[in-house]
């Protein structure tokens, strides 16, 4: 009798067991990979800056068939490089500019996403005075903010 009571407690109520099946027990080690994957994704997400960062332009090339767009290969952080497509005319090799990476929302409310601009992949956005909510007349609204 004790064995039956114990079995019914482990398996759940008989009615529920017949309707939904017995509860499956996880084996040790099973599901640990899922937890590791979730933890790694969270760590990567946490590493992304929550505000614009300074990036150095390493190389500039034109976007084919698009007169005003240019591809800027930029260095962000330690050795990490991304490609950003921009129409800002003040880009120079070696210049340092404010950059918003995907997932960030600028002060002006623009949500930055990775995507294709002029048929070329872009991994961020150079910030201009409007994006940073600068209202000073000293800044040209069509230029990216250069910091060095």
Image (cartoon, helix red, strand yellow):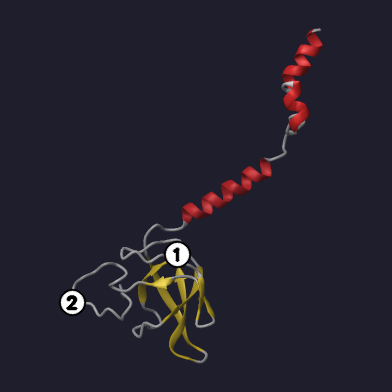
Q: Nearer the viewer, residue 96 or 65?
A: 65
**Which element type, helix, strand or loop, lies under badge 2?**
loop
Q: Residue 1: which numbered mark, if any?
A: none
**Residue 114 percent across, percent down from the top left:** 50, 69
How far apart are labels 1 and 2 at the CA level?
31 Å
Q: Nearer the viewer, residue 129 or 76?
A: 129
**Which element type, helix, strand or loop, lies under badge 1?**
loop
Q: Nearer the viewer, residue 121 or 71?
A: 121
**Residue 69 percent across, percent down from the top left:** 44, 85
* Residue 9 image-quadrant placement: top right
Left or right relative to 30: residue 54:
left
Q: Residues within 10 Å of mark 1 (few under 14, many from 20)?
A: few
Outermost top residue: 1
Left or right relative to 54: residue 13:
right
Left or right relative to 35: residue 85:
left
Measuring 76% from the left and 21% from the top, which residue is drawn there? Answer: 14
Q: Nearer the viewer, mark 1 or mark 2?
A: 2
Q: Residue 77: which numbered mark, if any?
A: 1
**Residue 128 percent across, percent down from the top left:** 32, 74
Residue marked by disc 2: 137
């Amino acid at each position: 009798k004790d064995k039956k009571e114990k079995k019914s407690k482990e398996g759940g109520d008989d009615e529920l067991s017949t309707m939904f099946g017995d509860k499956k027990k996880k084996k040790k080690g099973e599901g640990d990979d899922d937890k590791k994957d979730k933890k790694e994704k969270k760590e990567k997400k946490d590493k992304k800056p929550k505000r614009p960062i300074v990036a150095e332009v390493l190389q500039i090339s034109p976007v084919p068939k698009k007169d005003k767009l240019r591809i800027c290969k930029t260095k962000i952080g330690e050795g990490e490089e991304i490609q950003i497509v921009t129409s800002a005319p003040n880009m120079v090799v070696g210049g340092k500019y404010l950059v918003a990476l995907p997932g960030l929302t600028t002060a002006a409310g623009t949500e930055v996403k990775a995507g294709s601009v002029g048929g070329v992949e872009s991994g961020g956005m150079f910030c201009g005075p409007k994006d940073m909510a600068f209202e000073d007349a000293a800044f040209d609204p069509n230029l990216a903010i250069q910091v060095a």
